[in-house]
Structures are given as C-alpha cells and as structure tokens.
Image (cartoon, rainbow, N blue to C red):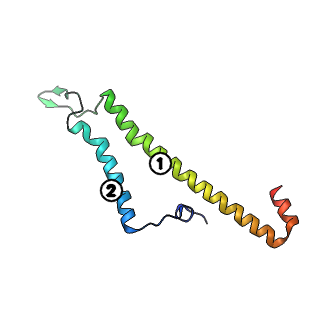
Amino acid sequence: MLDAGCAMNWNRTRGRVLMMIAGVWMLSVIVSLPPLIGWKRPQPVVNGFPLCVLSEEPGYVIYSTIGSFYLPLVVIVVVYSRIYVAARARARRNLTSAALSQGTSSFCLLIG
C-alpha cells in the first residue's frame, strides 16, 4: 500500500512537524487578524448594540480568499503531484522488476 508518508520520503522530525503546525497557525493568524486591528468598515449599530457581521471590505475579501483558499490549494496540488509522481515511479519499478523475473516476453505484453 502506498501512502503519502511512503511516497514523499521526508524526514518527519519533531522539529519539522512542530514547524509545520506553527506555519498553519501563523497563516490562520495572518488571515484573520487584519479586521481585528482596523482593516474593516465600522459595524452597524442596532438598538445601541453593534451587529456582528463579516468584513465586506473588498481588499480584505481578496486577501483572505488568497490566504485561506488559493494558497492551501496550491500546496495541496503540489504535494499530491509529488505523491502521484512517486507512486507512478514505484509502480513502473515494480512492473519492470516483475517482468524481468518472468522473462522479456511478458514484459512486452505488460507494457503493450
């Protein structure tokens, strides 16, 4: 069975794992912090109480969409592409070694 850990061959040390977790948390903070520190329109007030609304500031919407959707999408596509390439290479190696152990005629049948 081939899984991501087997295909990627990364040294998953404790420090590297902690850095990955810290990176995800930092991205979350970077995406969600700007409206809290002022990148927003004033909140509407009803009966003396502010309404809790999402930031509709166009610049922040684009910023948060890139940080919370497109950037993770690119990372996922790159990682899955590497897994696919590694899996394909391993399958070809296994196919070649199996065909060589059975003889060259079965190698031609397997590929063709």
Q: Residues within 10 Å of mark 1 (few under 14, many from 20)?
A: few
Residue 106 - label = none
Occupied quadrant, residue 37: top left
* Quadrant of the image containing the N terminus: bottom right
Give the farthest residue toward the right: 105
Give the farthest residue toward the bottom: 101
Which residue is drawn at the image coordinates 35% and 35% (left, top)?
A: 63
| Residue identified by numbered label 1 | 75
Q: Is residue 5 left or right of residue 61?
A: right
Residue 22 - label = 2
In percent of width and height, residue 90 lies at 66, 63
Residue type (three-letter) at the residue carrying disc 1: Val
Sequence-first tag of 2 and 1:
2
* Quadrant of the image containing the C terminus: bottom right
Q: Secondary structure at mark 2?
A: helix
Q: Is residue 6 left or right of residue 13?
A: right
Q: How many discs appear?
A: 2
Which residue is drawn at the image coordinates 80% and 73% (left, top)?
A: 101
In percent of width and height, residue 20 lies at 38, 57
**CB under 8 Å between callouts 2 and 1?**
no
Which residue is drawn at the image coordinates 30% and 29% (left, top)?
A: 56
Please determine whether, in this image, residue 1 is positioned above or below residue 62.
Answer: below
Q: Secondary structure at mark 1?
A: helix
Residue type (three-letter) at the residue carrying disc 2: Ala
Which residue is drawn at the image coordinates 16% and 27% (left, top)?
A: 45
Q: CA distance from mark 2 to mark 1?
A: 16 Å
